[in-house]
Image (spheres, helix red, strand yellow):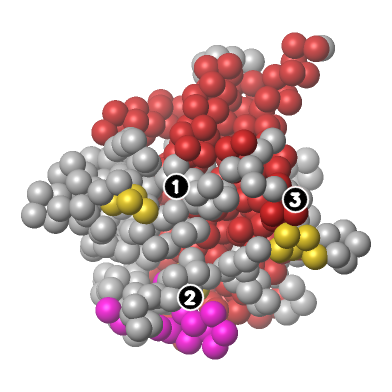
Amino acid sequence: MSYKGSFGKRLDVEELFGERRFRELSEREKLLQAYRHLEELRRLNGGYIASPYKGEDGVDRYNVFWLRDIMYATYANEYIGSFDKMIESYRLILRIFQKYRHKISSGARKRHYLGSCADEVIHARVHPVTLEEITHEWGHHQLDIFGLFLYKSGDLIKKGHNVIGTDEGEVLLLLRDIVLYLTTVRWHSDPDFGVWEEGPEVHSSSIGSVLAGLTMWHDDGYYHYKYSYPIDLHTYVPIPQEFVEAGRDALNRILPAESASRPYDMAQLSLIWPYNIVTESQAHQILKNIEENLVRERGVIRYPGDLYFNADPALPMGNEAEWPLGFAWLSIAYSKLALRALRMGGMFGRPSDFIERSRWYLERLESVMTDDGKVPELYSGGKMNANVPLAWAQSFYVVARQSLSHVDELMERRFVS
């Protein structure tokens, strides 16, 4: 692997780091190498393939686009200051939404649950060049895709970045169609297939995602603490207060569970980061449930009895695949709790305790990464599968390392001052 240096010279990783293993590198070197692996998955149009794996005879291949994966994979760019790349990725998602806008418009006219692969459902996976839908075989009705897009696009706009592009009028009409779609299909009470594309069930992670997106655009002050000069997004896409209230009530009713069949799920970490849409006590309950029930030696299982890459499907409990992604997510969550505790003067806990926990999970993550710094999708029966690296897991490593570095710096300033 190589990358282009600041003066145009192509440098090999071996030239930079020699024969040292990833865990032997400095923090900065780890960041550079991990990000470089992520960049190898980026395509010219701003998307990220989920992993380099081409599948067996093209079947079950991961070298394609998942919409959610792209939005999370590009998150790393914000944490290294490369907003232009992040904006390019979100504009690609906009292009895909525009390409299939007829589905959103059609779905907005329905008054009932949209099936797994109904004609009114935006597909989660598309071809990386043509952007054509790839499969109709599993659950594409995933509300969190829209919630994540609304949340982060609004966040970027409030930070002064032009996600919309030059065709503002057309894009705002599309965003209003998305809001109408979400409210028409009763996102707070109707089932979907969730982050793991399984179901249908009502998922707290899906409700929280859409609630965060609508809250961001409703602009009632909930997220104002994040911005120096907040932009009033509600003037572009009005969000009725009743929608936000209905979502909040629904989320409070279902928590701390993920769904009727899952008392806890790794996807619930999204409610803490990136969305920060739960209360302090709810966040700690989510963390407690996940740490006590889902954390394993090489990662975090998605939920009890998960059959995906299960080491023994006949005895699924205790043989679930372990996702290193979960270590990264937990590290980020604890960094964000530390940041909140610092901001509130320790009202919600000791920052040093959260920082220690964040560092512990980051070290656990690095212990299960490859020797050259890639984050596998999962381990099954003690062995990693073929999806190495997994794009959004690779991104989360960058976010975790940068988040921890940020709170460490704030703690140092606190004691110096």
Of callouts 3 and 2, the N-terminal one = 3
- Quarter holding residue 409: top right
**Mark 1 residue type:** Leu
Left or right of residue 225: residue 64: left
Disc 3 to disc 2, C-alpha distance: 30 Å
- Asked if residue 126 shows in the view, the reply is yes
The image shows residue 200, relative to residue 259, as above or below, that is below
Quadrant in which the N terminus appears: bottom right
At horizontal 15% and vertical 53% (from top left) the residue drawn is: 312
Q: Which residues are the magenta region?
A: 124-137
Q: Nearer the viewer, residue 153 or 312?
A: 312
Left or right of residue 212: residue 26: right
- Give the image location of residue 298, x and y in percent: 37, 40
Quadrant in which the C terminus appears: top right
- Give the image location of residue 108, x and y in percent: 41, 76
Membership of 129 in magenta stretch: yes
* Helix, strand or loop at mark 1: helix
Q: Nearer the viewer, residue 170 or 336?
A: 336
Question: How crowded is the residue under tag 3: few (<14 C-alpha within 10 Å), some, or many (20+)?
Answer: few
Residue at the spot of label 3: 16
The image shows residue 139, relative to residue 402, as above or below, that is below
Of callouts 2 and 1, the N-terminal one = 2
Tags 3 and 1 touching, CB below 8 Å = no
Mark 3, mark 2: which one is toward the viewer? Answer: 3
At horizontal 28% and vertical 74% (from top left) the residue drawn is: 138
The image shows residue 192, relative to residue 394, as above or below, that is below
**Mark 3 residue type:** Leu
**Mark 2 residue type:** Val
Q: Which mark is residue 325?
A: 1
- Give the image location of residue 361, x and y in percent: 48, 32
* Helix, strand or loop at mark 3: helix
Residue at the spot of label 2: 64
